[in-house]
Amino acid sequence: MMRAAPFVLLTALLISQSVACDARSCPPTDYAASTLPDDEESGALHMLQMSAGKQHEANAELGKIRQCGAGRPVQVFVDFDDTYKSSGGFWPAGCEGIYTKEVIFPGMAQFVLELARGPEEALKVLQPAVMSARPDALKFLRAKGGDRGGCRQKAEEVKRESFAAKAMTDQQTREDPAIWDQYNVEMKVQIPTNLTSYSYEAGGVKKLLGSSDSLGEKFGLDVNGSKYGQLTDFVDFDKMGTTKYNSFLDFFNDTVRDHDEACVVWIGDDGQGDCNPAAQKMRKYVKKQQPELGLKVAFIHKLACTTDFTKKPDCQEELADDDGAPLIIFDNYLDAARKAAKRNFISQAGFNRVKTAVEDFYATYCDHEGASKAPETVGTLGCQRLRAAISETSGGKVPDVPRHENRAYRRFEAFCKGCCNDKVPNGESDFPLDGYSFRCHNLYHHSSRWKFKMQASADSCLTHCGLGAMR
């Protein structure tokens, strides 16, 4: 009886230590110094030591912060200026003028869809939303869809304001404004016909996780779930980034049902606080209900500022680590898709679809050698950069004709046929397209009897229809 007392005390000590010690920092104990001479008790002691070690490992594993889990619903948030669309280099919207102001970046919409679907190519997804520092009070700056508060907007308002939302769809109509061809709005996103999407603010996370077949919507931009900033943010990079981080927190803390069951993907640029401080803070956020990061990955567009610009905040690429999500810097959306596929954030087929979207843009707006044939959309520098990216992923080959039909390409063909003879004007003042008549003097303007009849300019014919422009 006397000999059993130390064994009982040691047992109690081991059990208490295995339960009470901190899961991340249980100190090692020299149990060998307490070994009893009795063989039976030594065997029992050895078993207790093994049990305590396993308990320590289990506690440590439970306390470890995990990367946001595979298979969880993905909410993609994307910045607006110089990420979703070009600022044209106009301050304070942004600094990169490679593309004309308002032009949707090639491949952006397809890349967003692929991130929402993930490497398993889910057919039920959350709708992407804008997260911007644009002042909420300035309604004309917001990205709008075709309705406001459930009421239809006037037709002219829809035409002027909804191009950003339309770019995230697979729909084109002959009634779409002609200027949208200049903005790269009319490129169709490749969306599976059986794909269903849900808005997060309307319980989309819960619907995705549920077993019932909840009715969803066609894939598109979640306009109502988009988030904006304050007037006081608009010229302060740190405030801009903090506002976006607070919007990220709002997604998890205030507005979303089952928010801990979702992962956020953030797409921004390195110009105005999207990377630092926004993404740097996002990547370390831990969900309240479980030891898991809220951010799955951040993709940051590296801008080539073409105008005088205040020094950009420092931005560094980050790998996934014990307490932070990865941060990936990219030059264009083909580059982003390549890196995303390599790290298993999208499928290889998804990468190919983004590649096709970028190639279709190139074949529409750039000539074979990398010169712009639509300077009203993209400059030659932009075409040359796209050519290099495409060539790198295609064994040196670049496309001459888009794989998927789009109205912008047909517009250039119709203009060159109706207004130019090879590279010079033919004297005509109008050309037909989709049942409408457009002006040779400005190929995006409808003809009108109230406007002077003017032929195309020599520069316009040379640029849009010159050697290599249309093949």
Image (cartoon, rainbow, N blue to C red):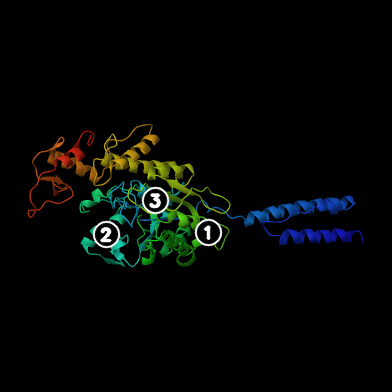
| Residue 457 visible in the displayed image | yes
| Residue 192 visible in the displayed image | no
Amino acid at pointer 3:
Val
| Marks 3/2: CA–CA distance | 21 Å
Amino acid at pointer 2:
Glu
Please tell me whether mark 1 sits on a helix, a strand or a loop. Answer: loop
- Which one is earlier in the sequence, the residue at label 1 or at label 2? 2
Give x and y (percent) for residue 193: 35, 50
Q: How many marks overall?
A: 3
Give x and y (percent) for residue 461: 16, 39
Please tell me whether mark 2 sits on a helix, a strand or a loop. Answer: helix
Q: Report the side of 206 relative to 80 (left or right).
A: right
Q: Report the side of 24 relative to 370 (left or right).
A: right
Please tell me whether mark 3 sits on a helix, a strand or a loop. Answer: helix
Nearer the observer, 421 or 82: 82
| Residue underneath mark 3 | 112
Camera-side mark, 3 or 1: 1
Give x and y (percent) for residue 13: 79, 60
Camera-side mark, 3 or 2: 2
> Callout 2: 10 Å neighbours few (<14), some, many (20+)?
some
- Which one is earlier in the sequence, the residue at label 3 or at label 2? 3
| Residue underneath mark 2 | 161
Nearer the observer, 149 or 183: 183
> Callout 3: 10 Å neighbours few (<14), some, many (20+)?
many
| Residue underneath mark 1 | 285
| Marks 3/1: CA–CA distance | 22 Å
| Marks 1/2: CA–CA distance | 34 Å
- Which one is earlier in the sequence, the residue at label 3 or at label 1? 3
Q: Residue at x 21, y 33 (%)?
A: 467
Amino acid at pointer 1:
Tyr
